[in-house]
Image (spheres, rainbow, N blue to C red):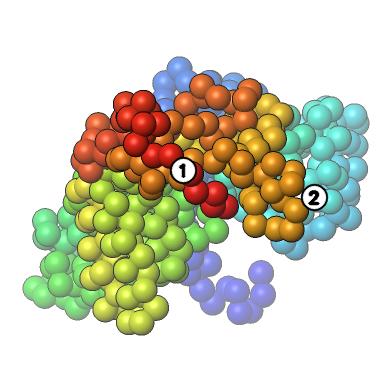
């Protein structure tokens, strides 16, 4: 301790969320699906037999806190490393020390790395031998999907636990604990929080206890006393956070989850849900062109021929976005989304195309029948190209019976129309007029 560090209490300088980190499993809030009585991880922690772990989940769900609880419980040496600043040399030094401790004193080493997805390949490879032979027990925490960010070798040697967003009652419990804790929390203040303020904070937290604790601390410390009490109203609660945070990470899982919900809401014919997720995407700052690309795709994939106008609506909205930009373009974008969500649905276009692609990939490509080949190049007719082609518009109903597929493909059906919307009105039955045309028409037209 030096002259300056003695002048203040380091513990009280730390933010409330840091001070209120749980010290034991009994103080830990949430994640009962992995830490409830009798659960595997709970039993392993209680028995001090934790194996290498990857803790994966959104921010503020208790990943680092859980690692610290494990550290407090274990008899192993606990080392915390930083994924950005700890290089391969540092990792090797830790492994050397851990090897000595294990062989000389029988003491295990537990290494914790927060934001482990920032580990590069070299750092991960340096860890592997020690993790594999049990020289160290490794705990990594990440907000990113570990199957995308970590190499398969490290994943295969670790047990993956997913942490979930905290529920509103769990957020409320965390705030109440902070208000009553006189040692680490705000228990020394006389605080009264009105019900609307509680509701606003719990809603604002969006499953992130750290965010709620930060708002609580700011509100309590900046609210003046009135009759010896700090009264927290809804207005103060709103002021402490300024705006409701939207959980959205363009580079992470949440980005794809929200896009998925948006797409599935349009496909599922729920206009309210589709508008909600569109609003989340726009408010979170997603690239509107990316949103429009998804709208155009699903106008064809999920509506298609059941309502061909949906595709026109989507393209019109994309054009409006280029001309208007946001915020005005939100209106035609919403119109296109509503057109898709409320339209009759058919996925015949995507199914038909996928069937055709699958067939082409799996079977030899047949030669174009002679009567379908182009006759509009020199000497083509000498080769028999186009001979025998029947021009459909020269026949009643603009149809004539002739083959358009190679011999080995004939009889294959790729397009199966649905009975939805406009598609059900399409007459796809071939008219039975072959004999009539043979009698009526005595010529044919050769066209490419």
Residue at 62% from the left image edge and 25% from the top image edge: 407
Other residues around mark 2 within 10 Å, as few (<14) / some (14–19) / many (≥20):
few
- Left or right of 85 in this view: 168: left
Return the residue nearer the eye: 161 or 440. 440
- Frontmost of labels 2 and 1 is 1
Q: Nearer the viewer, residue 73 or 6?
A: 73
Total numbered labels placed on residues in the image: 2
Image: 237 above or below 433: below
Q: Which residue in the structure is indicated by mark 2?
A: 121
Residue 443: which numbered mark, if any? Answer: 1
Q: Residue at 45% across / 63% down in the picture?
A: 290
- Could you tell which of marks 2 and 1 lies nearer the N-terminus? 2
Camera-nearest residue between 117 and 353: 353
* The N terminus lies in quadrant: bottom right
Quarter where residue 103 is shown: top right
Residue 219 visible to an observer of this rendering? no
Disc 2 is placed on an element classified as helix
Q: Residue at 60% across / 74% down in the picture?
A: 5
**Picture coordinates of residue 205 (x, y %)?**
32, 56
Q: Please give left or right for residue 230 compared with residue 131 in the image.
A: left
Q: Position of residue 284 (x, y in %)?
A: 38, 66
Quadrant housing residue 87:
bottom right
Q: Is residue 448 left or right of residue 86?
A: left
């Amino acid at each position: 301790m030096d002259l300056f560090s003695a002048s203040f209490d380091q513990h009280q300088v730390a933010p409330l969320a840091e001070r209120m980190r749980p010290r034991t499993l009994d103080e830990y809030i949430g994640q009962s699906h992995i830490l409830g009585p009798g659960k595997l991880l709970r039993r392993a922690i209680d028995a001090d037999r934790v194996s290498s772990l990857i803790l994966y989940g959104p921010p503020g769900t208790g990943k680092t806190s859980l690692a610290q609880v494990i550290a407090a419980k274990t008899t192993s040496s606990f080392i915390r490393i930083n994924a950005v600043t700890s290089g391969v040399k540092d990792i090797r030094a830790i492994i050397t020390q851990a090897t000595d401790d294990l062989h000389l004193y029988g003491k295990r080493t537990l290494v914790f790395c927060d934001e482990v997805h920032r580990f590069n390949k070299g750092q991960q490879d340096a860890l592997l031998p020690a993790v594999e032979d049990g020289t160290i027990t490794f705990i990594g925490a990440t907000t990113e999907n570990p199957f995308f960010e970590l190499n398969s070798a490290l994943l295969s040697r670790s047990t993956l636990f997913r942490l979930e967003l905290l529920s509103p009652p769990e957020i409320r419990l965390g705030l109440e604990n902070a208000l009553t804790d006189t040692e680490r929390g705000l228990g020394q203040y006389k605080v009264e929080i009105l019900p609307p303020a509680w509701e606003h904070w719990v809603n604002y937290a969006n499953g992130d206890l750290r965010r709620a604790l930060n708002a609580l601390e700011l509100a309590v410390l900046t609210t003046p006393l009135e009759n010896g009490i700090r009264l927290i109203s809804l207005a103060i609660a709103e002021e402490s956070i300024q705006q409701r945070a939207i959980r959205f990470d363009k580079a992470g899982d949440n980005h794809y989850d929200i896009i998925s919900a948006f797409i599935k809401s349009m496909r599922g014919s729920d206009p309210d849900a589709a508008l909600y997720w569109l609003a989340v995407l726009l408010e979170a700052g997603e690239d509107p062109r990316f949103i429009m690309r998804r709208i155009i795709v699903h106008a064809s994939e999920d509506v298609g021929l059941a309502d061909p106008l949906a595709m026109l609506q989507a393209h019109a909205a994309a054009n409006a976005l280029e001309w208007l930009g946001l915020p005005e373009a939100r209106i035609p974008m919403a119109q296109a989304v509503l057109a898709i969500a409320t339209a009759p649905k058919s996925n015949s276009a995507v199914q038909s195309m996928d069937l055709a692609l699958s067939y082409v990939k799996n079977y030899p490509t047949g030669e174009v029948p002679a009567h379908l080949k182009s006759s509009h190049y020199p000497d083509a007719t000498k080769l028999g190209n186009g001979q025998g082609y029947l021009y459909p518009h020269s026949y009643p109903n603009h149809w004539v019976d002739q083959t358009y597929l190679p011999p080995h493909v004939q009889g294959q059906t790729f397009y199966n129309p649905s009975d939805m919307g406009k598609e059900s009105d399409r007459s796809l039955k071939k008219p039975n007029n072959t004999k009539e045309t043979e009698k009526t028409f005595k010529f044919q037209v050769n066209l490419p």
